[in-house]
Image: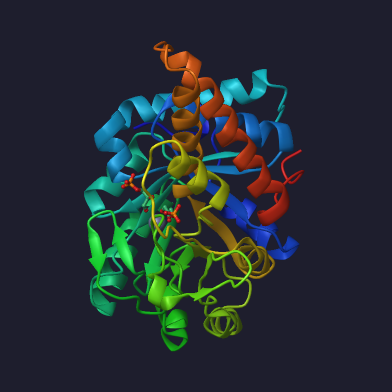
Amino acid sequence: MISYKELGLVNTREMFAKAVKGGYAIPAFNFNNMEQLQAIIMAAAETKSPVILQVSKGARNYANQTLLRYMAEGAVAYAKELGWENPQIVLHLDHGDSFETCKSCVDFGFSSVMIDASALPFEENIALTKKVVEYAHQFDVTVEAELGVLAGVEDEVSAAESHYTKPEEVIEFATRSGCDSLAISIGTSHGAYKFTPEQCTVDPKTGRLIPPPLAFDVLHEIEKKLPGFPIVLHGSSSVPQEYVDMCNQYGGSLPNAVGIPEEQLREAAKSAVCKINIDSDSRLAMTGAIRKHLAENPSHFDPRQYLKPAREAMKAMYIHKIVNVLGSDGKAA
Ligand code: G3H
Ligand code: 13P
Ligand code: ZN
């Protein structure tokens, strides 16, 4: 058993309370490799923003859970070396799919876990979430749960269509499960193809797809039922067209990739939404920069040559999200 406190990590309780009160959101960035982690820490240290490092099942399969945990421990030391005296870094399990997975992360130094039982019937979702909460809270690890189902793929949880969270269920769910934060479904979804072209309108000036708006009425209903309770939005990449274009211009094929407009995320961050999950935008920034670099420098074969601009592109993207979208800069000074 290793406590996250020994690793210099923090849980989400205090940072969420401050974010809800202050009308901003904490960035939750997924990481799978060193360059992503470096870019996240550089961005958070430079802006003095609290940050959540998220590890998915896919990341654990790709990079190994043990290695990722040690990397997060190293990230705390790295942040201090960068001049961030009091880093507020959370290591969070993204989309935990069983009690055993959550327990193994709690035991191994994660400071926060998500149990995603959103595909289960209501009572089973409550029962499994409660079991994880009872275990995690013994070690002061915070727990995120999910109610409602996002469209698209949630690791291995898939749903043919999005089912918005039912506001009339949230009080009973939060009270009986004891979760610390709740991920809800209001129209976001995972990946770089959040809406089909048929669901969008076309901007006559640019020819770009304009997605349908998020269900803010559902969000506001939920806020009324659970005043001040921390709400989480998954699937919140905005799929920046500059990176989509860069991928497409240099040999890629990402037709009709579309995300959540940043103005809507900005609006959500001012509400009880206090954690916003972003993964795909990092993938797009990295891939766009690598494609461009290799196309312009066909003789390069040292990975550092193309990973350096990729890291810079991700860092710029993370800083932009922190400062211009979520408003979390300066909140961990
Ligand atoms: O929730 C989905 C995240 O973007 C993680 O995706 O399982 O491919 O790492 P992944
Ligand atoms: P995106 O695919 O929109 O980046 O969402 C990531 C996410 O929700 C991770 O849990
Ligand atoms: Zn997610």
* Residue 73 visible in this rendered orientation of the protein: no
Q: Quadrant of residue 54?
A: top left
In which quadrant will I find the C terminus? top right
Q: Residue at x 59, y 28 (%)?
A: 312
Residue 19's x, y, as percent?
67, 58
Q: Is residue 176 left or right of residue 13?
A: left
In percent of width and height, residue 275 lies at: 56, 57
Q: Is residue 242 above or below residue 184?
A: above
Residue depicted at x 72% and y 37%:
48
Given residues 283 and 153, the one toward you in this image is 283
Residue 249 lies, in percent from the top left, at 47, 41
Residue 113 visible at all: yes
Image quadrant containing the N terminus: top left
Colour scheme used in the picture?
Answer: rainbow
Marks counted in the figure total: 0
Of residue 265 and residue 9, the one placed in the foreground of this image is 265
- 208 vs 48: above or below: below
Looking at the picture, tell me which residue is in the foreground, 292 or 33. 292
Position in image of residue 74 (x %, y %)? 50, 22
Image quadrant where residue 125 sits: bottom left
Q: Residue at x 51, y 72 (%)?
A: 211
Locate residue 133 relative to residue 227 in the image: left or right: left
Location of residue 301 with respect to 140 vertically, above or below: above
